[in-house]
Amino acid sequence: MLTLHRAALVLPDPADPTAPSFADGAVVVRGEHVEAVGPYPELAAAHPAARVRDWGRAVLTPGLRNPYGQRALERDYHPDPREQIGVEPLADGLAGCADETRCGASARRGLQRMLGYGVTAVAGPFERPSVRTAVARSGLRATAGELSAGAGEPLGGAVAGAAPLDPLAVLPLGRAVYGRVTAGGRADFAVFELQEAPEVRGAGVREVHEAQGVSEVSEFPEVSGLPEVSGLPEVRVAEVQEASGGSAVDVEGNSGPRAGGCLATVLGGRLVYRRR
């Protein structure tokens, strides 16, 4: 069955300032892959039988890559709510721990929280067998190495305390995304709420209208073994590249439109996180 994801702004490749973007755009998903990307009216007409998931005034982008994967999942401890010690990760809480069961459970909780920030890939390599298993079962892509913070310094070494679960807390969107949303590619993407309608400069579009209503659709299965998480902190998108004319839509927060929390994360065509 086809699913059509509609958003006020679709950015298939924010890392490339020459890539096209679509006001009132859509992504058509069949199974695990993207079938088409483009303007919503055209795709809706071409696929009249597709079920529609309308995200309203939102921006749809590729999923994000957390550059701190190894540190976040193998050193920091992600508490179980039943422990009643809070939900925030404890820096180096797994250092010296030889209990693989505990490490694996912590990693699963950390991965689920990452999904709530739009993360679809994590940086490894992972040395603990339990963590490797947790990542593999989650469906998130494991990639090699941390990003550089500049001047050759690893990004992970520049942050004190627990590793951030939200890549947008430390990186602009163009550097935080992993891959692109393209026909034939795997359907890994995230949807972020826009608190204001973006002004798409250089494309002649001054306003993106908020969608009216949401089509009723069936739910997708969750990632195996990982319960849905709600109530996550606000995601702040630092910069959204807009291709037409090579301009950008600034959603930093204090100047111009802002991005609110992550509304949804789609991983391999499955809706694995949806904000309640």
Image (cartoon, rainbow, N blue to C red):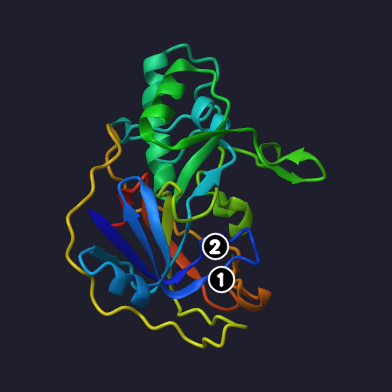
- Where residue 95 sits, quadrant-wise, is top right
Instruction: Residue type at mark 2: give it.
Output: Val
Instruction: Residue type at mark 1: give it.
Output: Val
Residue 256 spot, x, y in % from top left? 57, 79
Q: Residue lying farthest front? A: 46
Task: Note whether 244 is above or below 120 in the view shown.
Answer: below
**Is residue 118 in view from this perspective?**
yes
| Crowdedness near tag 2: few (<14), some (14–19) or many (≥20) residues, C-alpha within 10 Å | many
- Check disc 2 and report the residue beneath it: 237
Q: Is residue 253 left or right of residue 79?
A: right
Q: Residue at x 33, y 67 (%)?
A: 55
Secondary structure under tag 1 reads loop
- Check disc 1 and report the residue beneath it: 251
| Crowdedness near tag 1: few (<14), some (14–19) or many (≥20) residues, C-alpha within 10 Å | many
First in residue order: circle 1 vs circle 2: 2
Residue 146 spot, x, y in % from top left? 65, 37
Q: Nearer the viewer, residue 215 or 238?
A: 215
Total numbered badges shown on the rendered structure: 2
Q: Residue at x 20, y 52 (%)?
A: 219
Please say if the residues under marks 1 and 2 sit with CB atoms less than 8 Å apart: yes
Residue 194 spot, x, y in % from top left? 44, 71
- Where residue 101 sits, quadrant-wise, is top left
- Where residue 201 sits, quadrant-wise, is bottom right
Quarter of the image for the C terminus: give it. Answer: bottom left
Q: Is residue 216 left or right of residue 79?
A: left
Q: Nearer the viewer, residue 60 or 83?
A: 60
Q: Give the CA separation, mark 1 to mark 2.
A: 6 Å
Q: Residue lying farthest right? A: 151
Task: Note whether 236 is above or below 245 in the view shown.
Answer: above
Q: Residue at x 53, y 82 (%)?
A: 199
Secondary structure under tag 2 reads loop
Residue 210 spot, x, y in % from top left? 35, 80
